[in-house]
Image (cartoon, rainbow, N blue to C red):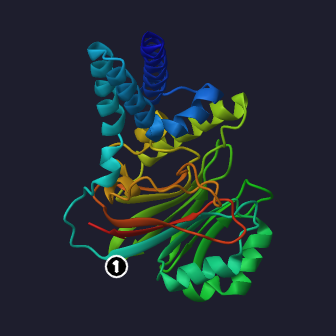
Amino acid sequence: MRRFFRSAALVIGWMLVVVATGMFTVRQVGVTEITFVALVVAAPYLGVLSLAAVLLFAAARSRIGAAVALVLTIAVVGVQVPMFLADGPDNSGPDMSVLTINAAHGEADATSIVAAVRDNDVDVLAVQELTPEEVTDLQAAGIGDLLPYSFTAALPVADGTGLWSRTPLTDGTRLDNFGFVPVQAQTTFEGHDLTLVSFHAMSPATPRHTAEWDADLARMRSIMETYQGTVLVAGDFNATEDHRQFRELASSPFSDAAEAAGAGLFRTFPSERPLARLDHLVTSDDVRARSVRPLAIPDSDHLAVLAEIQLP
C-alpha cells in the first residue's frame, strides 16, 4: 500500500509539474490561441500547483522531483513579486487622479461614476463602452460641473470611448484600425503637457477576435511611441500582466501604474467575483504611481480603477 501511495504521489507530482511548466512557458512566450489566452489569466495560481508538487515529491522521497518543483515554484512566484513592490521615480511634479471605467454597454450607473469623480477629486476620467445614452446620463448627473472638458466617440453597444478632464482638451482624435474606437486628446495639467488616451482592446472571445486583440495591443504600443511628453493610457486592455502582449505594451519607456505602485494582484473583472485585472493605467515611466485600487460602480461588469499619480 505504501508503494502504491508513493507511486501515485510521483505520478500526480509530475503531472502538476508538466501543467505548471507548460502554462508558465505560455505566459512567457505569449500566444494568440484563444484557449491559452484565457488560461494565462490563471498564471498567478501556478505557484499553488508547483508547491503541491513539492509536497507530493517530498512525501514520495523524490529529491529530484522536489528540486525540480521547487525551482519551478520560485520561478512562477518570482514573476509575480514585482506586483507587490513599489518602484518609481522621486518626482516633484503635481499630484493627479485618474479614473477609468468600462461602462458595460452604457449600463453603468452614471450617478455613481460622477460620485466617484467627486469623492476622489478625479482630474481625468476615461470611459469605455460609452454609448450616447451614457453620455446623456453622465451629463444629467453633473459630470460637466466636475470635469468640464471632454472628447468622446459615443457609439452603440461596446464600440465607444470617451475622455473627461478638469483641464482643457485639445486635438481630440479617434484612433483608426482598432476593434473598438479609442480616443486621444492633449491637455496641460499644472504646466505639464500630457497625451491622454481612453483605450479598449478587442475582447479575445473568439479566434478572430483574439487575433484582433493581439493586433490592438501591438498597434496601441506603436502609437504610444509617437507621442511627445508624458503619456497616460487608461482603459480596458482585456489583458493581464501575465499576457506577454500587455507586458510588451507596458514596457520601457512606459509602465503599468498598478505594478509601479506595488498594488498587488487585485482584480477588476467580472465585478461580482473578479478573476482578472483587465483594466489598467499605463503611463510614461517617469510618472510616479502613488496608489492604484479598484472601485465598484453599480451595473458595470468591471470594477473601475482609480490611480493616484505624481507627474515628473
- Would you identify the image quadrant in which residue 216 lies? top right
Tell whether 232 sits left or right of 236. Answer: left
Q: Position of residue 134 (x, y in %)?
A: 75, 71
Secondary structure of residue under mark 1: loop
Q: Which one is nearer the viewer's eye here, 226 or 58?
A: 58
Residue at x 46% of width, y 42% of height? 221
Residue at x 68% of width, y 59% of height? 301
Q: How many marks?
A: 1
Q: Position of residue 177 (x, y in %)?
A: 65, 41
Tell whether 158 sits left or right of 199. Answer: right
Above or below, comparing residue 206 to residue 191 in the picture: above
Above or below, comparing residue 275 to residue 92 in the picture: above
Residue carrying label 1? 190
Q: Which one is nearer the viewer's eye here, 31 or 17?
A: 17
Residue at x 26% of width, y 73% of height? 93
Q: Which one is nearer the viewer's eye here, 161 or 27?
A: 27
Above or below, comparing residue 242 to residue 82 in the picture: above
